[in-house]
Amino acid sequence: MTALLETLPVPSGRDALSVLPALSRMLDGDGPALLPVPAGDPREIRRLTDALSPGEPIEPGVGLVVATSGTTGIPKGAQLTAAALRASGEATYTRIGGPGSWLLALPPHHIAGMQVLLRSLLAGTEPVVVDVSHGFDPAGLPAAVDAMPGPRRYSSMVPTQLIKVLDHPAAVDALARLDAILLGGAATPLPVLERARAAGITIVRTYGMSETCGGCVYDGVPLDGVRVRVGDDSRVWVGGATLASGYRGLPDHPAFAEAGWFRTDDAGLLEDGVLRIVGRLDEAISTGGLTVVPQVVEAVLIGHPAVREVAVVGLPDERLGSRVVAVVVPAPGTDPTLAELREHVEASLDATAAPREVHLVDALPLRGPGKVDRRALVSRFS
């Protein structure tokens, strides 16, 4: 019988645990290939199903089709086998100290939240859920952590969540009782990492994507079975046991053109086996004939005491081609000016990288569980 892709509506909150039996069958090879979608969000369900065609045949061996967050706005479906998902979970446990219980604090239909459910199944534990359907509230963490059984306890989060936690002392104390927080989905500012670690929170920085079963490089070091290389153009390539078999319905997609490897759009450095991501090749800003990497500027700006969160984008400019613009969530009680932020950047980087425009906002728009939606910022401020 031809295998078909089936939609798996994943509820939010504690009801997310209702999908565990279907995921367990998938991991054991006894169930159909599943397409997780957010239950209760008809618009997003329609967007994903229109793009990824549930109910139609799928190649043998695929267990899960996970929608990417879609920098172009059009979702692609990473085809993950049960073997790849198991390899990811087992390699994670080898790296972080063994199986344990998990706190689910991310949307479970995305790969990072889905992996919390799958790692729980591999460990034979049931995750404790923090409902994030209406946003993440760190006030719920102390009770949730209290409900987690030992001996080892873990969670996965994105940097924006950690930033909120650090302003909530009871939540900080709760996370400090966990054995590890896998932190990924976006770059984490160094000052945020330093504050978290000084507070006793065990952070493991992860790098990966839906196409690699989520995080596959921890603190710069590939997990067992994962291969990483960096090309002459600084592009990062990832291969190995956790790699997707390709994209749903896109057999000739160039990202998978080289057998056994996935071509990312990330620029990185590989030094003594340790990977460092320096930015996105597709987000570089060409301004006045020079190239500015947004993440490099952001890393400097986040060190300013008046900057709580920041995103740097390029906006069209008749003279420069693009001008560097900073969108800032200010620290409480502050009102940073363009002049002081430019001065701060110029103390570390070339003047070309200093923002020519600053916008103060209450929050940065996100796509997926934790990546800044730069397209939305460009549209808003152009």
Image (tube, grey):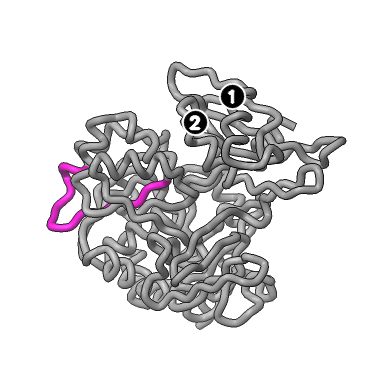
Residue drawn at (30%, 53%) of the image = 17
Question: At which x and y percent is residue 79?
Answer: 52, 70
| Residue kind at label 1, given as amino acid type | Glu
Which residues are the magenta region?
Answer: 145-158
| Res. 52 in view | no
Residue underneath mark 1: 340
Check disc 1: other Cα within 10 Å, few if <14, some if 14-19, many if 20+: few
Residue underneath mark 2: 304
Residue drawn at (60%, 69%) of the image = 247
Mark 2 element type: loop
Count of all numbered marks drawn on residues in the image: 2
Tell me where residue 336 sits by quadrant.
top right
Answer whether residue 151 is magenta in the image: yes
Question: At which x and y percent is residue 113?
Answer: 39, 53
Q: Could you say which is closer to the camera, residue 209 or residue 319? A: 319
Q: Could you say which is closer to the camera, residue 153 or residue 41? A: 153
Q: Are marks 1 and 2 in contact (CB under 8 Å)?
A: yes
